[in-house]
Amino acid sequence: MIKKIFLLFLLLTTLIFSKTYIPRSIEEKTYLNNLRTQEITVGLLDNEFYNISSKEEPSLNEIIKDLFQNYLNLNVKFKTEAYYELKMGLTDKSVDIISLVNYPTLIEGGASWEVS
């Protein structure tokens, strides 16, 4: 019984504090390994909201880079451009995905959420 509790604790600690992603199933592991063999181009928005950082906190774009490169261990190159150019990149296949995080914008009548 104590052995089972220890193994469960060890597993949970590994999952919670892991520095790399641990796939949850064989299918997910296969899919992730397939992605790792490809070069993926991620579009990052060149926008003040995404680039603001401080000594204590990284910017959203830095977090996304860390997520793809270090946590998921993917072969990624990044393109930082305006939204319209990234959207065109999806059309002409120079960008595989765009990293979008909604952010509040001020419009008439107060703040709202911009939907991308």
Image: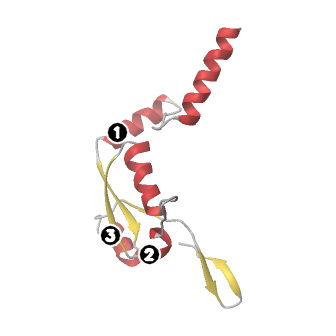
Label 3, secondary structure: give it: helix
Left or right of 94? Residue 113 is right
Q: How far apart are marks 3 and 1 (CA)?
A: 23 Å
Mark sitting earlier along the chain (1/2) = 1
State the mark number for residue 95: none
Residue bearing mark 3 = 89
On the image, which quarter does residue 88 sit in?
bottom left
Which residue position is annotated with label 2?
47
Q: Which amino acid does label 1 sit on?
A: Asn
Say left or right for 12 vs 80: right
C-alpha span from label 1 to label 2: 31 Å
44 shown above or below 67: below
Above/below status of 24 relative to 1:
below
Instruction: Please give the residue where the numbered disc 1 appears in the rendered image.
Output: 34
Residue that lies at the very extreme toward the front in this rendered image: 55
Identify which residue, 73 or 54, lies in the foreground.
Answer: 54
Could you tell me which residue is drawn at 50 percent across and 73 percent down?
49
Which of the 4 image quarters holds residue 80? bottom left
State yes or no: discs 1 and 2 in contact (Cβ < 8 Å). no
- Residue drawn 59% across the image and 22% down it: 10
Mark 2 is on which residue type?
Asn
Crowding at mark 2 (Cα within 10 Å: few <14, some 14-19, many 20+): few
Q: Do the residues labelled 3 and 1 touch (CB within 8 Å)?
A: no
Could you say which is closer to the camera, residue 77 or residue 93? 77
